[in-house]
Image (cartoon, helix red, strand yellow):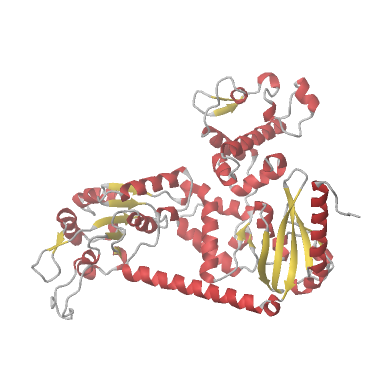
């Protein structure tokens, strides 16, 4: 007699149940976490790990956020992305485990939680050959990276590309557009911006995108070189030029950069006496080494950078006007972090990953509250200060998720309706106008100043696409007036739905369009699960 069901759905249900039964019986332990990242259930086998994690019994463990009770867990990532992590090694104070993490989905396909299973505890004994191979591969990768970095340093190759300038805000996109454009020219580039905004990174990126990419990139921080040595540093020294000079002489930075690019950082600190000599090299592409009467031709493209106001220095007589005009051919102003706060989330992700990789540590994530707290800061030191704060919190904390307290900050709270409305309005303002006569055109119009404004004709919604799922059918049918909170919710839901449609479901792009962080968008999608699963 055939016990296998005949219809496909029944076979799938049987296979899923059988697979779950096998995993449950062979796993060393299992847990279930809900959409809010809170542990809702643990198996009997999992309870034996609780003492090593610092808990006396199940009551202290269940109900808390998984990031708080299981160091280095990636369960939150599985819930947020909906992607399983079938096999992984988890190491924390309880030991090293071979684990599997699977998203749990509701009837509509939306992620409602995740299940984690400990497949093996102490895999270092049962999987010793695989662990050794993994350790060898990791060591080889680290050594290759070290050799590549040493090779780049020896051959003076660029370390960054334009894509490494992280950010998708309008200000960041414009900087990258300008960088690509000036990379194709040979004229002098002047990078302007506050300290820590990424001027050196962009200089490397411009060189890497130019026709000179195969030639040397030589960097000089003018503020770091003693004034008495600057001329020798730039133009080189002829043999026996002065007492103590090398017998063979020494090439200066211009000679070393011949055919390539010379990056002059902190050009505003250059002493007046040297400014005239630099001007001649820029104009004539020739120089005289210190102590020599020989004129040497060079082919060098100069990229200069400064955090000072050169125009004001020219007016005060502190910087030569002719040199300023020679440098100010292709200026690029780098925005401060305050001017592109929407890029902080992307920067945090990249910086945390880099900190973990450089230190050989397990990756860590940032909570939505911590992201709000960091975004609210002014960051006078810009990206450099942000990295310092992240690295300090990363290394001083044992937890896998960083909270505001790790940065000495308080959660500024979820954006108020007014703040959220302003963010939505900025996002909607950037959206294309809907076709005249369309349902969307009846829901939104623009004021004479160009600002988007919602239109509520006869106190009811004209387009049912803008109705929240929670609105009673009687209200929709009769045109019953909605309350102000309900109307705000309708506008919020409609704007999020529209942004997701325009970005084909790309949540990071939708968050940028709405001028809110991705973490805030996830919080909003939890209120509207029908949008999250769309």
- For the C terminus, the quadrant is top right
- Above or below — where is 53 with respect to 115? below
Q: Relative to residue 91, is residue 183 depicted above or below?
A: above
Left or right of 130 in this view: 320: left
Specify whether residue 376 is in view.
no
Q: Nearer the viewer, residue 310 or 29?
A: 29
**Place of residue 32 in the rendered image (x, y in percent of width and height, measured from the top left):** 78, 59
Observer-nearest residue: 129 or 161? 129
Q: Residue furthest left?
A: 293
Percent position (x, y) of residue 516? 58, 44
Vertical comparison of 249 with 478: above or below: below
- Inspect this view and state whether residue 466 appears: yes
Horizontal side of residue 157 vs 421, given as left or right: left
Considering every residue shown, the one lying at the far right of the view is: 1
Going 30% across and 51% down the picture, which residue do you hit?
Answer: 190
Residue at the spot 75% in from the left edge and 25% down from the top edge: 476
Give the quarter of the figure containing the N terminus. bottom right
Q: Quadrant of residue 214?
A: bottom left
Location of residue 277 (image quadrant): bottom left
Q: Residue 431, image x and y in percent? A: 53, 33
Q: Nearer the viewer, residue 62 or 228?
A: 62
Q: Position of residue 387 (x, y in %)?
A: 50, 61
Is residue 70 placed above or below 334 in the rendered structure? below
Name which quarter of the figure residue 434 lies in.
top right
Say which of 214 and 203 sits in front: 214
Q: How many marks?
A: 0
Q: Is residue 460 left or right of residue 45?
A: left
């Amino acid at each position: 007699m055939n016990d296998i069901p005949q219809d496909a759905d029944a076979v799938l249900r049987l296979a899923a149940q059988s697979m779950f039964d096998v995993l449950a019986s062979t796993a060393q332990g299992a847990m279930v976490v809900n959409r809010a990242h809170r542990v809702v259930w643990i198996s009997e086998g999992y309870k034996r790990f609780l003492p090593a994690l610092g808990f006396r019994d199940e009551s202290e463990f269940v109900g808390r956020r998984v990031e708080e009770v299981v160091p280095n867990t990636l369960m939150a990532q599985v819930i947020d992305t909906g992607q399983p992590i079938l096999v992984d090694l988890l190491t924390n104070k309880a030991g090293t485990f071979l684990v599997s993490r699977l998203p749990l989905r509701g009837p509509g396909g939306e992620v409602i939680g995740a299940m984690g299973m400990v497949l093996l505890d102490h895999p270092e004994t049962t999987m010793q050959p695989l662990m050794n191979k993994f350790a060898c591969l990791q060591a080889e990768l680290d050594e290759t990276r070290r050799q590549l970095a040493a090779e780049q340093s020896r051959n003076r190759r660029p370390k960054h590309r334009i894509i490494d300038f992280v950010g998708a805000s309008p200000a960041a996109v414009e900087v990258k557009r300008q960088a690509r454009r000036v990379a194709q020219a040979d004229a002098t580039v002047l990078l302007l911006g506050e300290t820590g905004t990424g001027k050196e990174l962009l200089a490397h990126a411009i060189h890497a995108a130019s026709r000179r990419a195969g030639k040397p990139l030589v960097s000089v921080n003018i503020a770091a070189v003693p004034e008495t040595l600057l001329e020798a540093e730039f133009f080189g020294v002829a043999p026996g030029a002065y007492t103590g000079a090398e017998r063979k002489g020494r090439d200066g930075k211009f000679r070393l950069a011949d055919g390539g690019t010379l990056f002059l950082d902190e050009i505003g600190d250059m002493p007046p006496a040297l400014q005239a000599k630099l001007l001649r090299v820029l104009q004539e592409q020739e120089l005289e080494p210190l102590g020599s009467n020989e004129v040497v031709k060079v082919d060098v493209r100069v990229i200069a950078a400064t955090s000072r106001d050169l125009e004001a220095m020219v007016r005060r007589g502190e910087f030569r006007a002719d040199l300023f005009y020679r440098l100010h051919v292709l200026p690029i102003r780098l925005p401060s972090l305050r001017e592109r706060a929407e890029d902080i989330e992307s920067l945090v992700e990249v910086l945390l990953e880099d900190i973990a990789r450089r230190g050989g540590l397990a990756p860590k994530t940032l909570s939505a509250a911590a992201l709000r707290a960091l975004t609210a800061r002014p960051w006078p030191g810009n990206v450099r200060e942000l990295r310092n704060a992240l690295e300090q919190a990363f290394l001083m904390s044992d937890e896998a998720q960083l909270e505001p307290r790790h940065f000495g900050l308080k959660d500024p709270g979820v954006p108020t309706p007014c703040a959220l409305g302003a963010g939505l309005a900025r996002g909607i303002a950037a959206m294309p106008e809907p076709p005249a006569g369309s349902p969307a055109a009846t829901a939104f119009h623009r004021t004479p100043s160009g600002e988007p404004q919602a239109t509520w004709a006869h106190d009811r919604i004209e387009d049912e696409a803008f109705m929240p799922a929670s609105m009673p059918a009687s209200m929709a049918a009769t045109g019953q007036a909605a309350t102000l909170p309900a109307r705000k919710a309708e506008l919020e839901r409609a704007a999020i739905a529209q942004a997701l449609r325009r970005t084909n479901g790309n949540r990071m792009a939708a968050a940028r369009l709405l001028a809110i962080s991705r973490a805030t968008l996830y919080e909003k999608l939890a209120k509207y699960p029908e949008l999250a699963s769309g």
